[in-house]
Structure formats: structure tokens, C-alpha cells
């Protein structure tokens, strides 16, 4: 009985803590693309996506593989780079994603044998996937 009451009060405390917070449905995202046969790493700038909430239960980015494919298609199609491996980083908090962005950027800049190329938002920008045509992860 005590265990049940403790668990119930713990969950109630979390609800009260989150009750005042509004979800902004904004997601901030950036991507990194590289090839295992090259020493060049491409990194996009941070993009803000409005009205694109994370999945409620997992806090994962919906259609995250579609975002990786967008970057891969840009690198391979527009820049002619083959066999690119791409990944995306995301957060609902701008401060958190900015910290991850600069940490990732510093990681590659500190490596002497790697050339980092930043892709500006004028060159490439993530777009919301066409939800009707894409299977969710």
C-alpha cells in the first residue's frame, strides 16, 4: 500500500511540474554527412521546424530517417559526393541543440586529418517530409 501511494505521488508531482509548461511543437535539427572513404565531413546549420512535435512516448523525431535521406540526397545529388552516411541531431530546446552543434563542430575541427565544411541554410535546408507518402520509423 505504501509503495503504491509513493508511486502515485511521484507521478502526480511530475504532472504538476509539467502542467505549467506549454509544448511549443518546435524542433531544431541539424545533420552531419560523411563518407568512410573520404576525410571531408559536411555539417548543416541548425534549422527550426514549426508544428513538428516529437513522438510523445519516445521523444524521438518522427520520420528521422527521412531527414537523413534529405541530407544524403543533397550531398550525392547536388555536390556529387557518393556513398554518404548521414545522421541528424534534434531537440525541442534551441539551447540544447546549439550546445550539441558546437560540440560536434569542435570535435571535427580539432581533428587534423578531417576537413569540416559547413552547409549554410541558403544551400540546404531540411524540410518537413510529406507525411502521407512516408512510412514513420
Image (cartoon, helix red, strand yellow):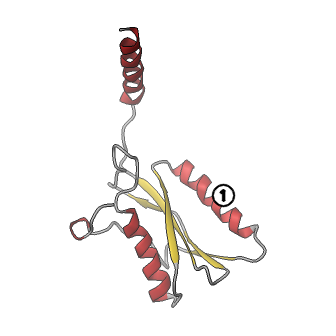
In the image shown, does 93 or 76 lie closer to the viewer? 76
x 64%, y 59%: residue: 102
Q: Vertically, is 101 above or below 44? A: above
Q: Quadrant of the N terminus?
A: top left
x 36%, y 56%: residue: 50
Q: Across the whole image, how many numbered discs are drawn on residues?
A: 1
Crowding at label 1, few (<14), some or many (≥20) Cα neighbours within 10 Å?
A: few
Residue 109: image location, x then y, percent: 72, 69
Q: Secondary structure at mark 1?
A: helix
The residue lying furthest to the top in this view is 2
Residue 49: image location, x then y, percent: 39, 59
In the image shown, does 29 or 56 lie closer to the viewer? 56
Q: Vertically, is 98 above or below 4? A: below
Q: Vertically, is 60 above or below 109? A: above
Identify the residue under disc 1: 103
x 39%, y 19%: residue: 7
The residue lying furthest to the right in this view is 112
Residue 62 picture quarter: bottom left
In the image shown, does 28 or 63 lie closer to the viewer? 63
Q: Is residue 132 left or right of residue 58?
A: left
Residue 95: image location, x then y, percent: 56, 49
The residue lying furthest to the bottom in this view is 80
Residue 118: image location, x then y, percent: 60, 74
Q: Quadrant of the C terminus?
A: bottom left
Q: Vertically, is 53 above or below 12? A: below
Amino acid at each position: 500500500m505504501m509503495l503504491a501511494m509513493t508511486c502515485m505521488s511521484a507521478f502526480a508531482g511530475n504532472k504538476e511540474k509539467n502542467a505549467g509548461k506549454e509544448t511549443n511543437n518546435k524542433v531544431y535539427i541539424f545533420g552531419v554527412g560523411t563518407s568512410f572513404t573520404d576525410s571531408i565531413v559536411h555539417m548543416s546549420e541548425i534549422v527550426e521546424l514549426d508544428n513538428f512535435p516529437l513522438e510523445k512516448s519516445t521523444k524521438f523525431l518522427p520520420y528521422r530517417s527521412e531527414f537523413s535521406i534529405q541530407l544524403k540526397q543533397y550531398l550525392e545529388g547536388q555536390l556529387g559526393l557518393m556513398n554518404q552516411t548521414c545522421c541528424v541531431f534534434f531537440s525541442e530546446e534551441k539551447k540544447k541543440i546549439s550546445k550539441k552543434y558546437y560540440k560536434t563542430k569542435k570535435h571535427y575541427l580539432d581533428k587534423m586529418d578531417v576537413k569540416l565544411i559547413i552547409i549554410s541554410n541558403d544551400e540546404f535546408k531540411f524540410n518537413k517530409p510529406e507525411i502521407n507518402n512516408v512510412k514513420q520509423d
